[in-house]
Image (cartoon, coloured by chain):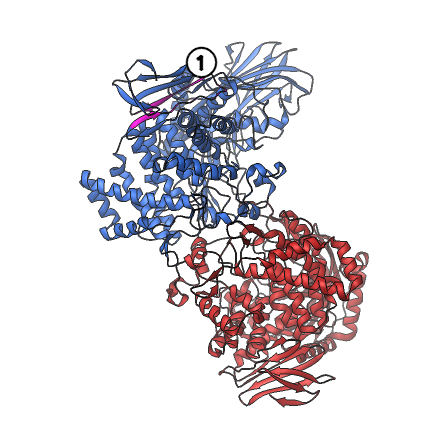
Chain colours: A blue, B red
Amino acid sequence: MNQDYIKADSWSIIEEGFDRERVKSSESLFSIGNGAMGQRANFEEQYSGETFQGSYIAGVYYPDKTRVGWWKNGYPEYFAKVLNAPNWIGINVVINNEPLDLNTCKKVENFQRELNMKEGWYKRSFVATMPSGLEVAVDVVRFLSLDLDETGAIQYNLQVLDGDAEVIMEPYVDGGIKNMDSNWDDKFWNITKIVSESNRAFVESHTMKTNFAVCTFMQAEVFVDGEKIEAPPEVNKTETLVGHTYSVKAAKNETITLIKFGGYVVDRNHPKDRLSETANKILDKASDLGFEALFQKQKEDWGHIWEMSDITIEGDVKAQQGIRFNIFQLNQTYLGKDSRLNIGPKGFTGEKYGGSTYWDTEAYCLPFYMATKNQKVAWNLLQYRYNHLPKAIENAEKLGFTNGAALYPMVTMNGEECHNEWEITFEEIHRNGAIAFAIYNYYRFTGDYSYIPKMGLEVLIGIARFWHQRVNFSQDKQQYVMLGVTGPNEYENNVNNNWYTNYLAKWCIEYAIEQIGKVAEEYADDYERIMTKTKLTEAEIKDWAKVADNMYFPYSEKHQVFLQQDGFLDKDMIKVQDLDSSQRPINQKWSWDRILRSPYIKQADVLQGFYFFEDHFSKEDLERHFDFYEPFTVHESSLSPCVHSIQAAKLGRMEQAYTFYLRTSRLDLDDYNKEVEEGLHITSMAGTWMSIVEGFGGMRVLDDTLSFEPQIPEQWSSFSFKVNFREQIVTLTASKEGTFFELTGNEALTIKVHGKSVELLPGKKIVA
Amino acid sequence: MNQDYIKADSWSIIEEGFDRERVKSSESLFSIGNGAMGQRANFEEQYSGETFQGSYIAGVYYPDKTRVGWWKNGYPEYFAKVLNAPNWIGINVVINNEPLDLNTCKKVENFQRELNMKEGWYKRSFVATMPSGLEVAVDVVRFLSLDLDETGAIQYNLQVLDGDAEVIMEPYVDGGIKNMDSNWDDKFWNITKIVSESNRAFVESHTMKTNFAVCTFMQAEVFVDGEKIEAPPEVNKTETLVGHTYSVKAAKNETITLIKFGGYVVDRNHPKDRLSETANKILDKASDLGFEALFQKQKEDWGHIWEMSDITIEGDVKAQQGIRFNIFQLNQTYLGKDSRLNIGPKGFTGEKYGGSTYWDTEAYCLPFYMATKNQKVAWNLLQYRYNHLPKAIENAEKLGFTNGAALYPMVTMNGEECHNEWEITFEEIHRNGAIAFAIYNYYRFTGDYSYIPKMGLEVLIGIARFWHQRVNFSQDKQQYVMLGVTGPNEYENNVNNNWYTNYLAKWCIEYAIEQIGKVAEEYADDYERIMTKTKLTEAEIKDWAKVADNMYFPYSEKHQVFLQQDGFLDKDMIKVQDLDSSQRPINQKWSWDRILRSPYIKQADVLQGFYFFEDHFSKEDLERHFDFYEPFTVHESSLSPCVHSIQAAKLGRMEQAYTFYLRTSRLDLDDYNKEVEEGLHITSMAGTWMSIVEGFGGMRVLDDTLSFEPQIPEQWSSFSFKVNFREQIVTLTASKEGTFFELTGNEALTIKVHGKSVELLPGKKIVA
């Protein structure tokens, strides 16, 4: 953890001072993205020090051949990896025959990075003393356009401060890219064409196996004190790279400016045979607009995003910065325009974890996108899973299931499983339930039922079939049991009767049966189509119901709590607070078997069930379970504190709720786990948002009514957020003086505040 | 499975006909070894078809860097692998400028391999039609000398059958060897010197990291129709190889004979700086003796081995061949001369499985070596583990244990863990118990207590300490429980309260306490030394006893059986016989999670406990447990059928016992699992021996008395084996006419036969 690394600032992420040790961490923290692509904050000019180069295109992946120590039946032969794409940001700078390389400079002064979250741009500036002693000042602004989301822009300004010099600038596109985490040192890209046309250049390449064709392009212009250099650049082409060399005699303090546009055109969005043509058109558009106009548009577009999704916190700059960083990164990663995309755990900031989609999307991210975007975005997230249903059925078949049972993968890019650790891949099957819950949650929040007859019911049927086959009847217990699973608490593997999973399975079956009934009654055509397609019979549904009606749940009479799994009480029940601090985090200090047999909980498990199904239990139930499980919870998953924060807030334990909130909101900014250099924890950022909105704001939808239980942490003077509820915007501002509500929309909306009905009228602000 | 692959023969393994598809399988089956080294039956001349080249030196290993999909704390960074050593058997043959290569020959006729187990040699002969049409006849005899165990000999005879020809023979030593299973394509060997001296050649190399220095050597002589060619060979040296080229003008039907001696000198046994000197001396010895005398000695030496260890079976040639193959391979792998060596699961026949020592050694191999060798051999096996005690303590420390607790590795070469699969490495801890049991078993069988005060007690203390720390007190059960283990049935992972492991833990503690008492009383000096070294206190021993006295054992009142683990009865209890045959073997047909939640048992688990501790339970207990568990047992481990065979025999179910026996005895010869090309299943071969001696022979040591319950399978007319019991040899011959006993020794021995005392007198044969 490193609290002073990033300067406290309400709208910007700022690093001051050049530290070689922090280059990789800052490359993660200052990453930029626009939903369609993203890149780590690598330097434009060459850097010979430790760096982790990364540029990523949404939805472009590579099926790497699986490498494991010990193969298990059922593992995928190949799995999709986030793919490092060709680099278009590169600009080699050579001054008086010396390359500019911050790693070899004698001195680097006034080094500053700024990620301006309000306006969506990244700036870096410094004054460097070259090995020869020459001083140069550089400032660079870079952004990935929201408006033209296939392109980005760079303005690279350089001044030689202490004399005249010969400056060479070589903007280039480099197609010779490798993944850090290639399993077999395979080549992932094949370059097919390298073209240079006046001040533009194009590298066409396609991924091996998946055959995504990509044209990586650039255009550059160089100015000296604002005056454009018209002489055509020298072209430098190798087998993997194309560069344009501009030589400039620069007088002392003259500013040399290089404006570069670059980006990717992908055959997912354009005809394969017209990629460079399309790239040319995009460059035409960008250069017609020019850097300044595109930059202006960027600021406006981010303004629109913030208008809807900003959370303000008064009286705590670091908390303010933290929540904005989280909201900013979520928006950089996924904007919901394309139902083929999803929210990777590292977004566009690193390669770790293989695929792009976890149950995080449904359990943590969906609420954020539902409340801060229009409902089409949430629909797209649901449709993503519908599109993958055939693969989920195939996946279940690989594991021995039949008759259309669907098991969604633990991790995926294209619907296929991307994970190979049996205790997770084959056993952490509760993920299936989160996907069904998201369907329920979408309808609950948006009131839009149409997804279910159109797509959702088929998903629900596939999932119900899975659970029905996954349990077995225990002669001993005379109930249905579920053996060999891993719950959300991954510090238990291959346990029997994980309460959360059993509960979710029962609920999924019941919810599916309920929706089948509703669709049969209200959407006869869809019902007909779905029954024909799934060959579902009344008899099968009855069999499901038998399972749901007679599911076993481990329970302790003594403690009056559901048990996380069979045998939980056999553990050595030492609370986390009584554990020597030298033993923590246990995932770094203990061997795996010791973690497994301990009572320690990585992230909410039973409590995750109480979070999803809050309305099934009383507040006293919640309190008893919270008091039983939280003391054994080590919160060693970035997804843990948010659920606990929400529950602590609900139980009126604001101090505790606030502590949990702090743990998530600045996880990456303060680099709690010393791993930010691998990339950011994108999906857990949605959990931070939930902590405020559902925790402190107490937002729920109860009986079709938007409802709040606002409380304010002592440390803050006020906080405020907006929620898009069924096409109307509700703004809540909680302060020491009271809670204010405001409605932007067309019609009155009745909400509940602390259980009492309150009518909001468009444009009117009220205290409640 | 391939029943007609190998010809039935009581003393030899014979393959007839050349089949490219079987080359790798036969390379395994015809492997030769002499305890100090061994090699797959690779061809001497070049072979361009599919082959698995392998030559191995006992105790020479390489610590390969671990490669896993998902790292777990506690995994070893490196682990020792069986190392493929330089090749000294190679002889390139070129006839009229065409290389002799069976893969490119037009025809290969009269191809035969014979592994003569009685005399310990391997022969191959064939008539090949070269691409040019020329016919050549070849026969080659090869053996690894038991007498000079650093050398082997080859006699390569070649005749050109249809004309004169120019024959070039190039015997060589090749140091440029790689392992098939290198994790990171590392180079394992470094060559330091390549020398040629008249008709001898030497390659000195050492292993990377472990730095074992090895001189691989050869000497060759060529004869034409018995007349030695005196002209010195041409020398061919590369960076990795040295060869001697002999050119011979061979007339039709003249026999060209190449006699090659070769082998390894290792710095484990000789001074590092005198390796080639030593190699020269060995070659002097071998060539002074000459091929024929060395060959004669080989036959005699194997005769001595058989004298003691042979089992004869009348009336069933295949059964006879099977048991002899097993006994032969065990002797090829380990002769018990060196306490630094052990019995690898693949012996010298392949690389699979990394390290060399599993709990197989203690649980399965020790009884064989105790009964067929002198007791020093068994002592050496025990001493091996004593030597590794400090590493076992280190290993336990890595997993968080303290105070001298010892956890022996799952797989090892030098005492360090060689395995990295958490559910096995960290959890299959019952292996510790097998090591303690072996100490008990050694004393029970040999009557030699001296190992315990000298070495064994320290081992027992380390193991007791481990169990004491590994359990925890369950408040819920008010007993000690053991969570998160894998029993011998590896089709269950991370279970709670595996009965076998709990029972073994309790026994280990009690046995350790008992031995501490005995050593205190009878070996005061040793006691003093050990107490000082281990810092063991009375208080600690009392703590151990508490655990042993109050251990929890899962039990079913309904079935009156101990349960394999908590929750076993929740499974879907469909018996193996009711499983569709298309589903088997389940380890090939089912995904891992499905196997885990099934009731199916890979190898004896509860019944392994009943095997070890037979005298703790009644025959009725055994019968009840056998009838409960065997129907769920799929026997998908090579170690499974033997224990069941012994127990079936004890229960008088000879038909079943015989069926189990058949499953082990010809596992490799008939290639049941289609994997013999990877190497042989050496350790399970000892289980086959046990099936006859302990199963059909009913041999036990009860109250210090050798005891038998002989029964004969219907399919046999008789069988016979010998047992070295405390320096006297008892021969049992069971036939339809009765059971005969004979004693070779100096004094009368009272044994029990079917519970009745029988006195055996030296040299006298009696019926009992």
Q: Residue furthest front?
A: A558
User: Few, some or many C-alpha atoms within 10 Å of disc 1 (few <14, some 14-19, many ≥20)?
Assistant: few
Residue A250 seen by the camera = yes
Q: Amino acid at mark 1?
A: Glu
Q: Which residue is mark 1?
A: A292
Left or right of A692? Residue B110 is right
Query: Residue B672 location in percent, x, y?
Result: 49, 68
Left or right of B104? Residue A312 is left
Q: Quadrant of the C terminus of chain B?
A: bottom right
Query: Residue B265 location in percent, x, y?
Result: 75, 62
Residue A32 seen by the camera = no
> Magenta segment range?
A705-726
Residue at image coords 76%, 71%:
B286
Front position in the image: A734 or A511: A734
**A211 over B384 or under it: above or below:** above
**A336 over B418 or under it: above or below:** above
Q: Secondary structure at mark 1?
A: helix
Query: Residue A760 location in percent, x, y?
Result: 29, 18
Residue at image coords 45%, 54%:
B592
Chain of the residue on which disc 1 is drawn: A
Query: Residue B636 location in percent, x, y?
Result: 49, 64
Left or right of A248? Residue B156 is right
**B245 over A394 or under it: above or below:** below
Q: Is residue B58 magenta?
A: no
Front position in the image: B21 or A737: A737
**A549 over B377 or under it: above or below:** above
